[in-house]
Image (spheres, grey):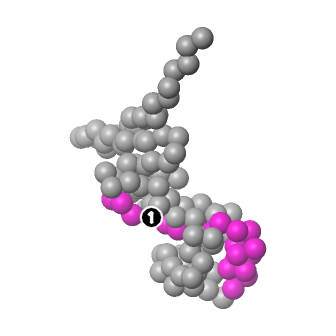
Amino acid sequence: MYGPPELEKLFLGIRHRFGRKFLPFSVYSFTSCKKILGIKRPETIEKFATSNVFLQSIYSDINPYLENQYFDSYEKEINDASLFINSKGNYQDEDVEIIPVVMNPKPTLSYICIFPKTKAKIS
């Protein structure tokens, strides 16, 4: 999930209410560049959710634990929303680039979506 200022604070505050249901999701705030890591595989979620670490970490930042625990298998196990952020701070994958636009004084987040140019076929 990508979003407005302090999005990660919102989800850190409510994560304990969702428990293991929140574990697959990764959150990234465009303005603060902060993130919450998620877990990709259901087997890994189950293993983590039944561990002693889960109850301790659900109320705090689990990023350091996940980064250390799954260092060798990071891309396979960890859902990291920041991996799709390019050098300009925009979301980008093979289909679209999304540019966040923050409007003040009341923080409002809008997006500009840029799609790759495709060659037109004329028959």
Residue 56 image position (x, y, % from top left): 58, 84
For the record, the magenta segment spans 30-51
Give the quarter of the image for residue 22: bottom right
Reading the image, the residue beneath label 1 is 35
Residue 77 image position (x, y, % from top left): 63, 72
Q: Residue at x 45, y 60 (%)?
A: 82
Name the image quarter holding the C terminus.
top right
The furthest residue to the front: 123
Taking 115 as reference, is 38 above or below it? below
Label 1, residues with CA under 10 Å away: few <14, some 14-19, many ≥20: many
Q: Is-magenta flag for residue 36?
A: yes
- In the picture provided, is 10 more to the left or to the right than 100? right
Residue 86 image position (x, y, % from top left): 38, 54
Q: Is-magenta flag for residue 75?
A: no
| Secondary structure of residue under mark 1 | strand
**Which of these two is toward me, 85 or 101?**
85
The furthest residue to the bottom: 52
Taking 6 as reference, is 121 above or below it? above
**Which of these two is toward me, 53 or 72?**
72
- In the picture provided, is 107 more to the left or to the right than 18? left
Q: Residue at x 33, y 59 (%)?
A: 32
**Which of these two is toward me, 31 or 123?**
123
Give the amino acid at mark 1.
Lys
Q: Residue at x 56, y 75 (%)?
A: 74
* Residue 56 in view (yes/no): no
* Residue 115 in view (yes/no): yes
Q: Residue at x 70, y 68 (%)?
A: 41
Residue 52 image position (x, y, % from top left): 66, 88
